[in-house]
Image (cartoon, helix red, strand yellow):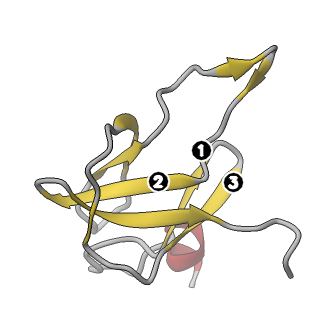
Amino acid sequence: MFYRYHYGIWPGARYPSQLHYCDGSYTRDDALDAPYSQPVYPAFEFHAPFAEARAVFSPNPKGVHVGDTPICTNLLLVRVGPHRYIPYRLDDPTSG
C-alpha cells in the first residue's frame, strides 16, 4: 500500500492513476487515450520503481506568474501516442 500511496501507481501498472505537481494532486480522467491538438509544454517526468518513466505535459508553459504568484495548471497530460494523451485533472481541495 505504501508504494501505491507514495507513487500513485501499482507496481507493474502502465500509467499512474494519480500525479502530484505544483502542490496539488491530479487524478486520471475517465477519458483514456483522448486526442488533444493544443500546444503542450513539458511539466516533469514521472518516475516510480518498477514502472516505465513517463513524460508529463501541461497546456501551460512553466514559469508563468501573476504578480509574484506562480500559476499552476488544472490539467496534466501523459502522452500515449501522436497527439493522444491521458488527461489528469486537478483534484478539488474543497470536496471531501
Q: Position of residue 76 (x, y in %)?
A: 47, 53
Residue type, label 1: Thr
Residue at the spot of label 2: 76
Say which mark, if any, is on residue 24: 3
Residue occupying the point 49% across, 35% down: 60
The residue carrying pointer 1 sits among few (fewer than 14), some (14 to 19) or many (20 or more) residues within 10 Å by Cα, namely some
Say which of 71 and 45 sits in front.
Answer: 71
**Pointers 3 and 1 in contact (CB under 8 A)?**
no
Identity of the residue furthest to the top in this view: 67
The alpha-carbon separation of the residues under discs 2 and 1 comes to 7 Å
Where residue 43 appears, x then y in whole percent? 43, 37
Relative placement, left or right, of 60 versus 21 is left
Question: Disc 2 on helix, strand or loop?
Answer: strand
Q: Residues within 10 Å of mark 3 (few under 14, many from 20)?
A: some
Residue type, label 2: Leu
Task: Give left or right: position of 87 versus 4.
Answer: left
Neighbours of disc 2 within 10 Å: few (<14), some (14-19), many (20+): many
User: Quick check: 49 above or below 53?
Assistant: below
Reading the image, the residue beneath label 1 is: 73
Quadrant in which residue 57 is drawn: top left
- Tell me which corner region of the image, top left, top right, bottom left or bottom right, holds residue 96: bottom right
Q: Secondary structure at mark 3?
A: strand
At a point 47% along the width and 28% down the height, the residue shown is 61
CB under 8 Å between callouts 2 and 1? Answer: yes
Q: Is residue 82 left or right of residue 10?
A: left
Determine the CA span between mark 3 and mark 1. Answer: 10 Å
Residue kind at label 3, given as amino acid type: Gly
